Amino acid sequence: MTGDLFDDACAPTPWVQVIGDDAVILRHFAIEWVGELLEGIANIEALSPFRRQQTPGGFWMSVSMSNCGSFGWISDRKGYRYAAVDPVTGNLWPAMPALFYQVAAAAAEQAGFKGFMPDACLINRYEIGTKMSLHQDKDEQDMSQPIVSVSLGLPAVFMFGGERRQDPVQRFPLLQGDVVVWGGRSRLNFHGVMPLKADLNEPNAQVGVRYNLTFRKAC
Ligand code: MD3
Ligand code: FE
Protein backbone atom coordinates (compact mmCIF):
# COMPACT_ATOMS: atom_id res chain seq x y z
CA MET A 1 0.00 0.00 0.00
CA THR A 2 1.18 3.48 -0.87
CA GLY A 3 0.90 6.12 1.86
CA ASP A 4 -1.12 9.29 1.53
CA LEU A 5 1.88 11.58 1.64
CA PHE A 6 4.66 10.06 -0.44
CA ASP A 7 5.20 7.71 -3.31
CA ASP A 8 7.37 4.92 -1.97
CA ALA A 9 10.31 6.18 -4.01
CA CYS A 10 10.05 9.64 -2.43
CA ALA A 11 9.52 8.56 1.16
CA PRO A 12 12.31 9.74 3.45
CA THR A 13 14.73 7.02 4.53
CA PRO A 14 14.20 5.80 8.11
CA TRP A 15 17.28 5.96 10.31
CA VAL A 16 18.08 5.31 13.94
CA GLN A 17 19.42 8.01 16.26
CA VAL A 18 20.72 6.78 19.62
CA ILE A 19 19.98 9.42 22.26
CA GLY A 20 20.91 7.55 25.42
CA ASP A 21 21.30 4.14 27.04
CA ASP A 22 18.38 2.04 25.70
CA ALA A 23 16.80 5.14 24.12
CA VAL A 24 16.48 5.65 20.36
CA ILE A 25 14.66 7.92 17.94
CA LEU A 26 13.47 5.99 14.87
CA ARG A 27 13.42 8.90 12.44
CA HIS A 28 10.53 8.79 9.91
CA PHE A 29 9.53 5.31 11.13
CA ALA A 30 5.76 6.01 11.05
CA ILE A 31 5.70 8.38 8.06
CA GLU A 32 3.68 6.09 5.78
CA TRP A 33 0.93 5.67 8.41
CA VAL A 34 0.52 9.34 9.38
CA GLY A 35 -2.79 9.81 7.56
CA GLU A 36 -4.31 6.68 9.07
CA LEU A 37 -3.02 7.54 12.56
CA LEU A 38 -4.59 11.01 12.33
CA GLU A 39 -7.88 9.41 11.24
CA GLY A 40 -7.66 7.10 14.23
CA ILE A 41 -7.21 10.08 16.56
CA ALA A 42 -10.30 11.77 15.05
CA ASN A 43 -12.35 8.61 15.68
CA ILE A 44 -11.11 8.30 19.27
CA GLU A 45 -11.72 11.99 19.96
CA ALA A 46 -15.37 11.59 18.89
CA LEU A 47 -15.84 9.02 21.70
CA SER A 48 -13.46 10.37 24.38
CA PRO A 49 -12.83 14.07 23.76
CA PHE A 50 -9.56 15.84 24.52
CA ARG A 51 -9.61 17.48 27.94
CA ARG A 52 -7.19 19.33 30.17
CA GLN A 53 -6.51 17.63 33.50
CA GLN A 54 -5.58 18.92 36.93
CA THR A 55 -2.45 17.77 38.75
CA PRO A 56 -2.66 16.48 42.33
CA GLY A 57 -1.13 19.85 43.30
CA GLY A 58 -4.04 21.71 41.72
CA PHE A 59 -2.37 23.03 38.54
CA TRP A 60 -4.00 22.63 35.15
CA MET A 61 -1.81 20.90 32.55
CA SER A 62 -1.57 22.91 29.33
CA VAL A 63 -1.61 19.78 27.15
CA SER A 64 -5.02 18.24 26.35
CA MET A 65 -5.28 14.47 26.61
CA SER A 66 -7.36 11.49 25.60
CA ASN A 67 -6.65 7.75 25.59
CA CYS A 68 -7.41 4.52 23.80
CA GLY A 69 -6.85 0.92 24.82
CA SER A 70 -7.77 -1.05 27.94
CA PHE A 71 -6.40 1.63 30.26
CA GLY A 72 -6.04 5.40 30.11
CA TRP A 73 -3.74 7.70 32.06
CA ILE A 74 -5.68 10.22 34.14
CA SER A 75 -4.84 12.92 36.65
CA ASP A 76 -6.91 14.85 39.17
CA ARG A 77 -6.59 16.19 42.72
CA LYS A 78 -6.54 12.57 43.95
CA GLY A 79 -3.43 11.66 41.96
CA TYR A 80 -2.02 10.21 38.73
CA ARG A 81 -3.21 6.73 37.74
CA TYR A 82 -4.44 4.40 35.01
CA ALA A 83 -8.18 3.77 34.77
CA ALA A 84 -10.32 1.54 32.53
CA VAL A 85 -13.19 4.07 32.48
CA ASP A 86 -12.99 7.59 31.02
CA PRO A 87 -14.10 9.86 33.89
CA VAL A 88 -15.54 12.41 31.42
CA THR A 89 -17.86 9.99 29.55
CA GLY A 90 -18.30 7.23 32.13
CA ASN A 91 -17.54 4.70 29.36
CA LEU A 92 -14.57 2.48 28.70
CA TRP A 93 -11.84 4.18 26.65
CA PRO A 94 -12.15 3.60 22.88
CA ALA A 95 -10.44 0.44 21.62
CA MET A 96 -6.86 0.76 20.44
CA PRO A 97 -6.93 0.64 16.63
CA ALA A 98 -5.01 -2.36 15.24
CA LEU A 99 -2.72 -0.04 13.27
CA PHE A 100 -1.72 1.87 16.45
CA TYR A 101 -0.81 -1.39 18.17
CA GLN A 102 1.09 -2.72 15.16
CA VAL A 103 3.16 0.46 14.70
CA ALA A 104 4.07 0.50 18.41
CA ALA A 105 4.99 -3.20 18.51
CA ALA A 106 7.07 -2.93 15.31
CA ALA A 107 8.95 0.12 16.62
CA ALA A 108 9.65 -1.57 19.95
CA GLU A 109 10.96 -4.66 18.16
CA GLN A 110 13.21 -2.55 15.94
CA ALA A 111 14.64 -1.00 19.12
CA GLY A 112 15.28 -4.42 20.67
CA PHE A 113 12.11 -4.89 22.74
CA LYS A 114 10.49 -7.93 21.12
CA GLY A 115 6.99 -8.86 22.33
CA PHE A 116 5.87 -5.39 23.50
CA MET A 117 2.09 -5.59 24.05
CA PRO A 118 0.82 -2.13 25.01
CA ASP A 119 -2.52 -1.97 26.87
CA ALA A 120 -2.63 1.85 27.10
CA CYS A 121 -2.21 4.65 24.57
CA LEU A 122 -2.17 8.20 25.93
CA ILE A 123 -2.85 10.83 23.26
CA ASN A 124 -1.36 14.25 24.03
CA ARG A 125 -2.52 17.28 22.02
CA TYR A 126 -0.17 20.30 22.09
CA GLU A 127 -1.53 23.62 20.91
CA ILE A 128 0.82 26.54 20.16
CA GLY A 129 2.47 27.66 23.40
CA THR A 130 1.72 24.48 25.37
CA LYS A 131 4.47 22.40 26.97
CA MET A 132 5.15 19.48 29.23
CA SER A 133 7.40 20.19 32.20
CA LEU A 134 10.28 17.88 33.14
CA HIS A 135 8.93 14.71 34.80
CA GLN A 136 9.39 10.94 35.13
CA ASP A 137 6.88 8.29 34.01
CA LYS A 138 6.45 6.00 36.98
CA ASP A 139 2.76 5.14 37.09
CA GLU A 140 3.26 1.85 35.22
CA GLN A 141 3.58 -1.49 37.01
CA ASP A 142 6.53 -3.07 35.19
CA MET A 143 9.50 -0.78 34.59
CA SER A 144 11.17 -3.44 32.42
CA GLN A 145 8.57 -2.59 29.73
CA PRO A 146 9.52 0.19 27.29
CA ILE A 147 7.49 3.22 26.27
CA VAL A 148 6.95 3.99 22.58
CA SER A 149 6.03 7.49 21.43
CA VAL A 150 4.83 8.59 17.97
CA SER A 151 4.96 12.28 16.93
CA LEU A 152 2.33 13.71 14.55
CA GLY A 153 1.58 17.19 13.22
CA LEU A 154 3.73 20.16 14.23
CA PRO A 155 7.34 19.61 15.33
CA ALA A 156 8.42 20.03 18.94
CA VAL A 157 11.66 20.11 20.91
CA PHE A 158 11.95 17.16 23.29
CA MET A 159 14.02 17.49 26.48
CA PHE A 160 15.83 14.37 27.62
CA GLY A 161 17.50 14.45 31.02
CA GLY A 162 18.96 11.89 33.37
CA GLU A 163 17.87 9.92 36.41
CA ARG A 164 17.90 13.00 38.64
CA ARG A 165 15.96 16.20 38.04
CA GLN A 166 19.17 18.25 38.24
CA ASP A 167 21.00 16.15 35.60
CA PRO A 168 21.86 17.97 32.35
CA VAL A 169 19.18 17.96 29.62
CA GLN A 170 19.74 17.25 25.91
CA ARG A 171 17.31 18.70 23.38
CA PHE A 172 16.10 16.86 20.26
CA PRO A 173 13.62 18.02 17.62
CA LEU A 174 10.77 15.53 17.06
CA LEU A 175 9.05 15.69 13.67
CA GLN A 176 5.93 14.08 12.29
CA GLY A 177 6.54 10.36 11.79
CA ASP A 178 9.39 10.11 14.30
CA VAL A 179 9.03 7.32 16.85
CA VAL A 180 10.95 7.21 20.12
CA VAL A 181 11.51 4.07 22.18
CA TRP A 182 12.65 4.27 25.79
CA GLY A 183 13.36 1.32 28.00
CA GLY A 184 15.88 -0.32 30.25
CA ARG A 185 18.37 2.17 31.66
CA SER A 186 16.49 5.25 30.32
CA ARG A 187 13.04 4.22 31.47
CA LEU A 188 13.00 6.51 34.52
CA ASN A 189 14.86 9.45 32.99
CA PHE A 190 13.41 12.93 33.38
CA HIS A 191 11.94 14.32 30.16
CA GLY A 192 9.62 17.02 28.87
CA VAL A 193 8.57 19.08 25.84
CA MET A 194 9.46 22.75 25.19
CA PRO A 195 6.61 25.20 24.46
CA LEU A 196 5.27 24.51 20.97
CA LYS A 197 6.26 27.19 18.44
CA ALA A 198 4.08 28.64 15.68
CA ASP A 199 5.86 28.31 12.33
CA LEU A 200 3.94 29.28 9.21
CA ASN A 201 6.71 27.88 6.99
CA GLU A 202 6.41 24.49 8.60
CA PRO A 203 5.15 21.85 6.11
CA ASN A 204 2.55 20.61 8.63
CA ALA A 205 1.27 24.09 9.57
CA GLN A 206 -2.20 23.06 8.32
CA VAL A 207 -2.46 20.46 11.11
CA GLY A 208 -2.13 23.35 13.61
CA VAL A 209 -1.27 21.17 16.61
CA ARG A 210 1.11 18.44 17.66
CA TYR A 211 -0.15 15.02 18.71
CA ASN A 212 1.94 12.53 20.60
CA LEU A 213 0.85 8.93 21.05
CA THR A 214 2.55 7.20 23.99
CA PHE A 215 2.13 3.44 24.17
CA ARG A 216 2.60 1.70 27.48
CA LYS A 217 2.11 -1.58 29.26
CA ALA A 218 0.29 -0.01 32.19
CA CYS A 219 -1.01 -3.05 34.07
C1 MD3 B 1 11.62 9.66 28.03
N1 MD3 B 1 5.06 12.78 26.55
O1 MD3 B 1 3.11 11.60 27.97
S1 MD3 B 1 7.25 11.37 24.63
C2 MD3 B 1 4.22 11.72 28.52
O2 MD3 B 1 5.98 14.23 23.53
C3 MD3 B 1 5.30 12.43 27.81
O3 MD3 B 1 4.09 14.13 24.56
C4 MD3 B 1 5.99 13.54 25.77
O4 MD3 B 1 6.33 12.62 28.37
C5 MD3 B 1 5.31 13.98 24.51
O5 MD3 B 1 4.47 11.26 29.64
C6 MD3 B 1 7.29 12.87 25.53
C7 MD3 B 1 7.09 10.11 25.81
C8 MD3 B 1 8.10 9.63 26.80
C9 MD3 B 1 7.61 8.70 27.65
C10 MD3 B 1 8.42 8.10 28.58
C11 MD3 B 1 9.75 8.41 28.71
C12 MD3 B 1 9.44 9.97 26.92
C13 MD3 B 1 10.28 9.35 27.88
C14 MD3 B 1 10.56 7.77 29.69
C15 MD3 B 1 11.88 8.08 29.81
C16 MD3 B 1 12.43 9.04 28.98
FE1 FE C 1 6.43 11.37 30.16
Image (tube, grey):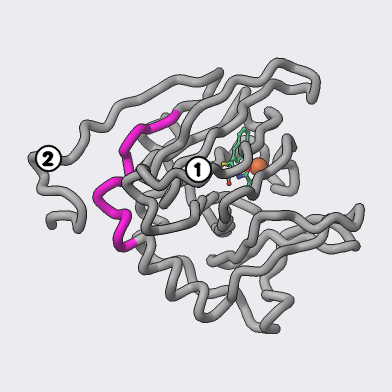
Which range is magenta?
25-36
Ligand 1 placement by image quarter: top right
Query: What residue does disc 1 label?
Result: 148
- Rendering quarter of residue 107: top left
Q: Amino acid at mark 2?
A: Cys
Residue 170 is tagged as none
**Which is more N-terminal, label 1 or label 2?**
2
Q: Choose mark 2 or mark 1, whichever is in front.
A: 2
Q: Nearer the viewer, residue 154 or 85?
A: 154
- Rendering quarter of residue 13: top left
Query: What residue does disc 2 label?
Result: 10
Q: Is residue 26 magenta?
A: yes
In the rendering, at what x and y percent does residue 25 appear? 43, 30
Whether ligand 1 has any atom under 8 Å from the Cβ at mark 1 is answered as no
Which of the image's four quarters has the C terminus? bottom right
Residue at image position (21%, 35%) is: 12
In the rendering, at what x and y percent does residue 182 appear? 54, 33
